[in-house]
Amino acid sequence: MLSYTLRRLAFAVPTVLVISLIVFLMLDMAPGDPTASLPLTIPLEVREQIRISLGLGEPVLVRYFKWLQMTLVTEPLHVLAGLTGWDIAPDGPRILSWQTRSPVGDIIVQRVPQTLWVVGLGYLFGILIAVPIGVISAYRQYSWFDQVGTFVSMVGFSVPTFFTGVVFILVFSVWLGWLPSMYDTTHVVRDWSSFVFQVKQIAMPVAVLALFNASQISRFMRASMLDNLNQDYVRTARAKGLGEQTVVLLHVLRNSMIPVVTVIAIGIPTVFTGAIITEQIFRVNGLGDALIRAIYVSDWPMVQTITFIFAILIVLFNLIADVLYGILDPRIRYD
Amino acid sequence: MPGNGQAVLRVQDLKTVFATRAGDIHAVNSVSFSLQPGELLGVVGESGSGKSVTMMSLIGLLPMPPAQVRAGEGHFGGNDLLKLGRKDLQALRGRDIGFVFQDPMTSLNPVFTVGFQIMEPLRKHMGMDKARARQRAAELLQLVGIPDAERRLKDFPHQFSGGMRQRVMIAIALACDPKVLIADEPTTALDVTIQAQILELVKELRQKLGMAIIWITHDLGVIAGIADRVMVMYGGQVVEYGPVREIFANPAHPYTRALMTTVPSVRGARAEKLNVIEGQPPMLSQHPTACPFRARCPQAFGRCSRENPARYTVAQGHDTACFWDHETGGERHV
């Protein structure tokens, strides 16, 4: 297992490098000018000098390798130094965001907590809701619980979050006035009342994402349980005189979780990428919001770096899913 | 070996119906039989004759719905199995009645170790602690002939061959010293050499432990080798019931005789084609009012399509459900 994991990790390195090249070149070739958002009164020569000062005068390959070196070494070390206080930050230039002039790494560090809280909680609640619903739906197949659950998950899965989000705002903020429609990042939890406010402002984005994720995962869970409920080993477990709870929640669930856990693991990168829209609706200034804003103003270093981070996460969690599969299913031995 | 004492299991008039969208399927129709302590009852019949469903109905292992046990009694140790509550039945399964199923490749849970799966009934029914259960599980594996039992407890089912897995299934079934072992085609999925080994093992275990066994199969050869009594089923009914020698020497029902002719002979010239019983077994959409075998029966006559034959005694402990008397070559006057 360990050697398999190491082999897969080694194989992931060229994959990530190829992705980085594609991400860099695609954005480099894209139309759009970092100086386009500057006032029109700036003369053309000055614009050209601005471009050169941004490093755009160098050949594309030189810029790629410089960017790669800064993304993989300089920025992470700076971020680590900032988090731990160790003196490991290297000298030399950092990747600067063209719009804000501050290092990309610092912006990302500011943005990640909001995304993790809001979107991560949405995913977590989604899983917590989905697993029991899937189990009960499958165990009581075609009961009213199953019918309602299947209908709701079909709706939840097919209606996009930008629609449910707006409906939620309309109902809970505009009509009922219970919840704030915008997420205030500067809010600090100090005491009970500020905690209540935090819960209120995080409730809607989390609910929207939880509904969407739960719809998806509960369908997987249900299908996987149904696959297993009719297996011969379930009859054996009953023939041994085990209670229904043990049969379903130990024997069947343990088998059904194998594909579901890997689906959940593969879905974790979408916590970051898929939330771009939800973050926009509720004005959560997370990572997705940073990406969208950077795209608006052709802030290529920012876009390149965030996209590349997403790519690394996807490769990494695919690897984790494969390893989990091997851990959960004793029949699979990679070595 | 059959004892003359009280039967361990006595089934009376069992009726099981599957309520499907297309209508009811009468899978078991008024089945009655008894099982003496220590005897091995062979249940024979082709696929769909209701052999397995009969036994599964008794201990509530059929999926309900669609299955419904509509009538009958199943006396076992002072209880009626068909009237017991879910919890009581659960307590009985695996403790007093053990099961071995057809396909050992899929009958064990792939994600738990063999040791865990043997220990489960021990801990649940016998209240053993972990250490004690592990010790007993190792003894059981040894009993069913798995070498290096102690170490193999930690192995997963996929690390065993088919025959070995069936031995594990037998170990699980025997874990709590059951009074009755129900084996549902336990050798069908195995190749012949392994089949012979399993049969030997069961014979040996029977001698050691003395439980009664119900052996469901469609292989007459297996029955001839191990059974004390035979119950032949067709269309969800018992068509012939009697001691094994009697059945093989004087088969009374045309279906039993037809089954005997389908067994290829090892002596003499090889037949060009295997013998078959022409036609299909019936799917009963209602309780039978005529003999279910009449369409395939060479002896069928008028009465067979008007009336469903009851079980008539033909010799001591031997009965058959047929209007045709094979002895006299004419109609039975009942």
Image: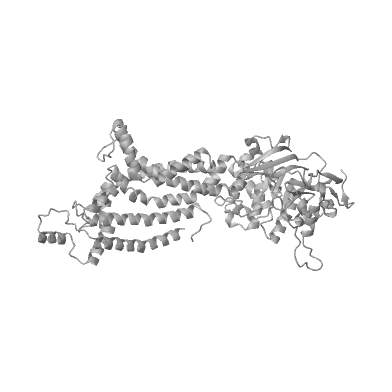
What residue is at 78 percent from the left and 40 percent from the top?
B7
Q: Is residue A60 left or right of residue A312?
A: left
Relative to B239, residue A1 above or below: below
Q: Quadrant of the C terminus of chain B?
A: top right
Q: Is residue A126 left or right of residue B72?
A: left
Residue A69 placement: quadrant: bottom left
Residue nearest the observer in this picture, B114 or A261:
A261
Whether residue A86 appears in this view of the structure is no
Whether residue A173 appears in this view of the structure is yes
Q: Is residue B175 left or right of residue A56?
A: right
Q: Residue B257: x and y, percent?
A: 81, 55
Q: Is residue B326 left or right of residue B164?
A: right
Relative to A256, residue A13 above or below: below
- Colour scheme used in the picture? one colour
Q: Residue A297: x and y, percent?
A: 21, 53
Relative to A11, residue B166 above or below: above
What residue is at 29 percent from the left and 47 percent from the top?
A112
Q: Residue B256: x and y, percent?
A: 79, 53
Residue nearest the observer in this picture, A145 or B304:
B304
Residue nearest the observer in this picture, B233 or B324:
B324
Q: Residue B177: x and y, percent?
A: 69, 44
What residue is at 56 percent from the left and 41 percent from the top?
A246
Relative to A81, residue B95 above or below: above
Figure label count: 0
Residue nearest the observer in this picture, B168 or B280:
B280
